[in-house]
Image: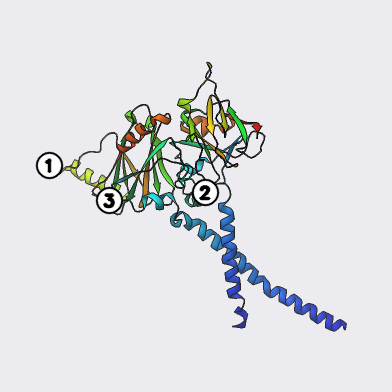
Amino acid sequence: MSDREILLRREIWFGRVLALIPWLLALLLGAVAVHLILILTLPALAPGSAYRQFARSLPLGEKLVLARAEPSTSRPSFADPFAAIALCRFDLKQGPLRLRASADGDRPLSVSVRLADGTVIYSAADRQTPGGRFNIVIVTQAQADAQDAARERTEQDDSEEANKPSAPPEDELRLISPGKTGFAVFRVLALRESDYETAVARIDAVSCSMEKAQ
Amino acid sequence: MSDLKPLPIVLAAAVALGVAATILSLRGEPGFDAVRLGPWDSWPRLGNSEIDPYARAVSAVEGALPLGGGEGLAFVAQADASGSPLDARCDYQISGAAPPARFWTLTAYDVAGRLRANTAGRYGLTSAALLRSADGAFSITAAREARPGNWLPLGEKSRFILVLRAYQANTSALAGAFEGLTLPTITRAVCS
């Protein structure tokens, strides 16, 4: 093989490698894009997520008390067998949701509010609230603004006493949700094995109710 | 047009690589911000709005309901104090400092997050029900067979995970000063 032929072959090989580079870059960028899209969409789309498993088909204003965790329980995973759990769904397009619960002083009670993708936007336990009571209303920013505007209007017009919207109770926590759909989780803990049925009775007493939008 | 001949292959390979990378990333830890205290790991951001997208995806795929930050904090152990993976063929002594919380529970799971079937039908222990010595100290034995005192049944499958949940935890102790916090130690005893 002559030097000229060797040179020519090297040029052809080099040209082929150069032509591959854009495709390799496209492959890398494409893989990164697919990965990021999957990671960002999985929380909303994963069929086994807590929201999809328990809350998505739950009627608004109704609560679901989960069965006690056992070895056959796959969802929710890593469930505490001493926690009695109830869930409520919210869809703020349909109106605000009010949550009420109160502790019996002995068994720890906690409430968390989560978006449909699982992000916890609020959580607290009974010892952080007055009297161990929860009175939470979940609203959008627009609904909160409408409530404030309605209250301001009636404060300026005392003559319309009959139509005055009631002032918010002192123990009310208004939670402005960054998302329209999600769910609330109540937990009451059994102090010991024999205490679980009492914890279930406490969780049966929590309530979720739809509120009228202003 | 012949210049675009590799396009379908490149697209298919990109999708395959992206899916594979996602599956691999979901098998890892739930989040980047693990707090490690001896054999115990915790991911405090799982329970608040600062959760990272990977932790959110792992949590959704696992179908978990992690504790909110205001509810408490969960610590997960997959190994004993010496770093050896937990194995139900061995007994383990769990003792030492209780977490600074109003109430805590200790539970054993398989790697998929299910409670471990056992003949006693007991799946965990609570701080309120522990037998303690006069000075308040406690010792728990995690074992397949019944043991005197505080027994945590492990069931038959060998690999298992321990989860310690500190409910209504003292947040200044847990969230702000992890370095000064001590949790129960997990010491391997006899193995069958």
Quadrant (top left/top right/bottom left/bottom right) for the C terminus of chain B: top right
Residue B55, numbered label:
2
For this orientation, the residue located farthest to the right is A2
Q: In the rendered view, does A18 fall on the left or right side of B94? A: right
Q: Is residue A75 above or below residue A107?
A: below
Read off the residue under disc 1: A162
Amino acid type indicated by mark 1: Ala
Q: Is residue B55 visible?
A: yes
Q: Nearer the viewer, mark 1 or mark 3?
A: 3
Q: Secondary structure at mark 3?
A: loop
**Cα distance in 3D space between marks 2 and 3:** 30 Å
Disc 2 element: helix
Q: How many marks?
A: 3
C-alpha span from label 2 to label 1: 51 Å
Chain of the residue that carries numbered disc 2 in the rendered image:
B
User: Considering depth in this image, is A82 or A60 the residue closer to the camera?
Assistant: A82
Q: CA distance from mark 1 to mark 3?
A: 23 Å
Q: Position of residue A151 (x, y in %)?
A: 22, 43
Reply above or below: A103 against A17. above
The residue furthest top is: B134
Which of these two is toward me, A7 or A117?
Answer: A117
- Which label sits in the foreground, 2 or 3? 2
Would you name the residue on which mark 3 appears?
A95
As displayed, is residue A31 above or below residue B78?
Answer: below
Nearer to the camera, B74 or B33:
B74
Q: Chain of mark 1?
A: A
Q: Quadrant of residue A73?
A: top left
